[in-house]
Amino acid sequence: MIKKNWIYILFVFSLIVFAVSELREWKIEQKIEAKSVYKGNGWGAQIFVDKKLYITMNNIPAVEGNKSFVSEEQALLVANLAISKMKKKKGLPSISVKELDSLGIIR
């Protein structure tokens, strides 16, 4: 009888530990979103983490010079690629020329 009680107590305790760890992980998850910005000579994008400005892309990343995106859609495509990389690596993303080409970004 005493062994059964200990088994139940250990089971409930492990459920509580699991629930607390899941709740903690859920609280830590951040909201990341992208917004496009028109700059007069083209488009850029901003990435916000928990409603705070985190990254500004005034120019196309990985491209020499100060070239803006030609469309809002292109700016958001690259911003969303950066966001997916941020979620995987938990840090600042890098965008390559090869990735820009695969997205069809006009340089």
Image (cartoon, rainbow, N blue to C red):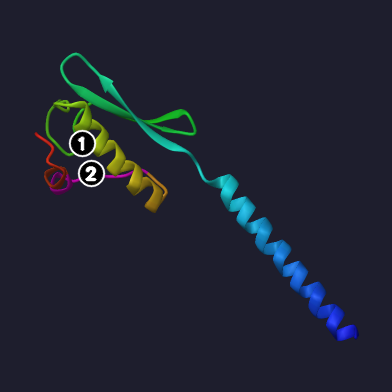
Q: Residue furthest left?
A: 107
Specify which label sits upstream in the sequence, 2 or 1.
1
Q: Amino acid at mark 2?
A: Ile
Which image quarter: residue 63? top left
Q: Is residue 97 magenta?
A: yes
- Stretch in magenta: 92-99
The image position of residue 20, as x and y in percent, is 68, 56
Residue that carries the numbered disc 1 in the rendered image: 61
Q: Residue furthest right?
A: 1
Task: Give the position of the N terminus as an image quadrant.
Answer: bottom right
Q: Residue at x 84, y 83 (%)?
A: 4
Q: CA distance from mark 2 to mark 1?
A: 6 Å
Task: Name the magenta segment's main secondary structure.
Answer: loop
The image position of residue 59, as x and y in percent, is 20, 28
Q: Is residue 50 magenta?
A: no
Which one is nearer the viewer's eye here, 29 or 1? 1
